[in-house]
Image (cartoon, rainbow, N blue to C red):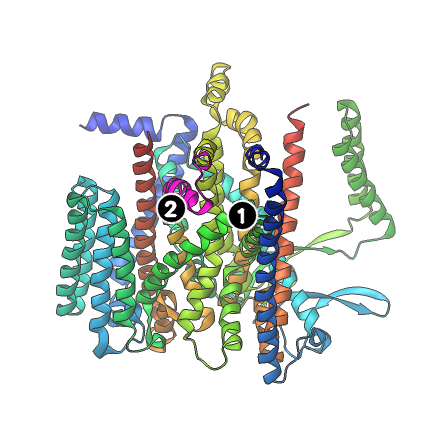
Amino acid sequence: MSTEIAEYHSIRPARRGLLIASKWLVQAAIVMVVAGLVIWLGLAVREALARKGIQFSFGYLGNVANFSLSEGFVLSREGNWPVLELFSPSHSNLQALLAGLWNSLKVALSAIVLCTMFGTLVGIGRLSTNWLVRNLCFGWVEAIRNTPLLIQIVFWYFAVVLRFPPANAASNWFGGLLASRSGVFFPGIAISERASIGSWGLLAITFALVIACVALRGLRLRLILLAAALSVLVATAVVGFPLGLDLPVATRFGARGGFAISPEMTALLIAIVVNSSAYVAEIVRGAIESLPKGQWEASASLGLSRSHTLRDIILPQVFRIVLPSLANRYISLTKDTSLGIAIGFPDLFNVYGTVSNQTGRNLEGVVIVMLTYLALSWIISACVNGLNARVNGRRGR
Amino acid sequence: MSTLALHWVHRNLFAKPFDAALSLVVIPLLAWAVYAFGHWALIDAHWQVVGGSFKVLMAGIYPADQLWRAWFAVAILCAMFGAGLGLSVRPGRAALTVVASLAILIAAGVAAAINPHAGVVTAISAVLGIAAWIGVHHAAVDQRIVLSGLLAGVVAIFVVLSPPGFEVWGGLLLSVVLTIAVSILTLPFGILLALGRQSRVTSLRLISTAYIETMRSVPLILVVYWIWIIVPLLAPDTSVPGLLRGMAGFALFFAAYVAEYVRSGLQAVPRGQIEAARSLAMNTWTLNVEIVLPQALRVVIPSLVGQILDIFNGATLVFIIGLTDFLRAGQMILADPQNSGRTYEIYVFLFAVYLAIGGAITYASRRLEAHLARGSR
């Protein structure tokens, strides 16, 4: 900046006007060239479409989709009430895209949570004092990072998930979890027959007390609130607990009850979690190593154990450092969900492909999908930046 | 000796109660995994499926009577790889020599097992590569000559391979050639974008920033697919081969990432250098070409080499535009009902090859980083 001012003042006044004018001319020329390029592109595309008898418009979004998706919820209207229902061919194209977005988001959000937890563990494992654990974690991270994500997704789908036992012989893990090639079934929560207004009310009071216990400060108050919450919970159980576990029961082609995940989503989720956790592990390891060694030494000289130091001294600081890198990772992870098309998972990109095949409207769809991904990236970075400001803002206090 | 080993085991595996507990859990699991995999790989697996479909995996549907072109390309590739190594790595490093000769022996062995001619060509290619490595290193050939040689090599590969038509390119050959071409294509565009983002001209800065940020926020698969669709609309009279359209998509996408790496390099150039050059009345072009870029690019060479791995891994996405890359070729073989039981054999082979190439690129990137760090001290 200062060099510019110095330059500017070294010029004779008579030439200053010329300089300013030439700068504006350059700007205008660049803008015009780029604008011209964009307009030429738009016109050429429009002409090409016109030759095919297509007009650029978003009207097709309201038309009936006439194709079905294997999964995905849409917001629909029933009377005056918005309801969440499974996508069906009678919904519109726009709702199909929304169902795709729902599917993408459901994988992305679960993967973000899981890969952060798993990745942190592996990252700590890479710094373990146990030689075997350290090198296994290193080998794992390198093997994952040096192979394409797509082959991992395809491998998990064709070589692992589709090799699960068929539904009627599904392996039953931990009493409730069913794994079969028609999907993975988790125990769900269902409303039991014993539910009544009274028991619902008592449960609500319990939740309110727990939230108050977490939110309020003061040890005595918290203890009293906790005791109150426990006693109300006991009272709820006596009256009749309104919620029960809904265990999945294997049938011939799937399972009834519980909470189901399709085989495509299972494979995609596992692949993305495993892949991203390798990157998260590297981020976490780098952050731990970047902390001053004195932190470890000071803790050791205070008699803190290694695990204690890690939990109470190192990790709280690490999460301040890693947030920006994690944000980038989360954005790539969200974009990676678009690879679900390789195994037929109906994510946003896949649904866009189907819609444009059905309607011949590729370009409008690209604009929509591109804007959606842009928005997702912005939302993720805004969330993490907000968190970052909060976490790092506290350091001053 | 045994006391030494015991000491090592004690220090590294059983130093503390927690470590001991971990070891007691991990060692049996690992032993079981190694045993199970070893048993499968050596006894149960039918590796003939890999040998039987080797040509499809390596070159897709490239016509069999034109395969000498593919072999010629492999020889050129090896020479290019050797010349590139010669720039930064001293030949004769014990560990590297052992690994390299092992790799060559395995490659030649596998090739010879499938076809005697293939073994001979592999051996010749390896010799060419090593000769280029030693030659470039010992003759201390100027970097600019080597770089132009590499560029000429890429052009030669395209010239040699193209006569049967771009549609028949496939397999590992397609993945590798696509990666190399895209890595080179992204450089000039990425550098221009990075300079644009740092420019003092506001409109240029805004446009470059918008382009970079947009490309970094959307998935690669979307960009590749979109370019593939839009090119025929823009040029309705000429049919551009799918491979070239795919390459354009990759280049447009990865240029944004190259721009960000280069920008980090530009920021590492001390401000005083630019001010000194300006005070010598250098114009912007000379300043960037002679002073800023040589220093900036030097810093980012390891990242750019690392990016080649991203491109290579991303090359698997060409399935979306109907090209048959290495992974797709493997899936095509599995689609044959005759091979339906050979899923694990094919995938293990694909993983092994991807890991070998990816590991080599990562290793090169780390070596270059160390090499450059040593040079700057």
Q: Is residue B119 among what the camera can see?
A: yes
C-alpha distance separating marks 1 and 2: 33 Å
Picture coordinates of residue A294, whole percent (x, y): 47, 19
Please tell me whether mark 2 sits on a helix, a strand or a loop. Answer: helix
Q: Is residue A347 among what the camera can see?
A: no
> In which quadrant is the N terminus of chain B drawn?
top left
Which residue is under mark 1?
B197
Protein chain holding label 1: B
Which residue is under mark 2?
A142
Residue A200 vertical position relative to residue B319 in the rendered view, above or below:
above
Residue B275 included in the magenta stretch of the image: no
Residue A128 vertical position relative to residue A374 in the rendered view, above or below:
above
Protein chain holding label 2: A
Range of the magenta residues? B277-305
Residue A92 vertical position relative to residue A300 in the rendered view, above or below:
below
The residue shown at (77%, 26%) is: A217
For the image, the number of numbered tags is: 2
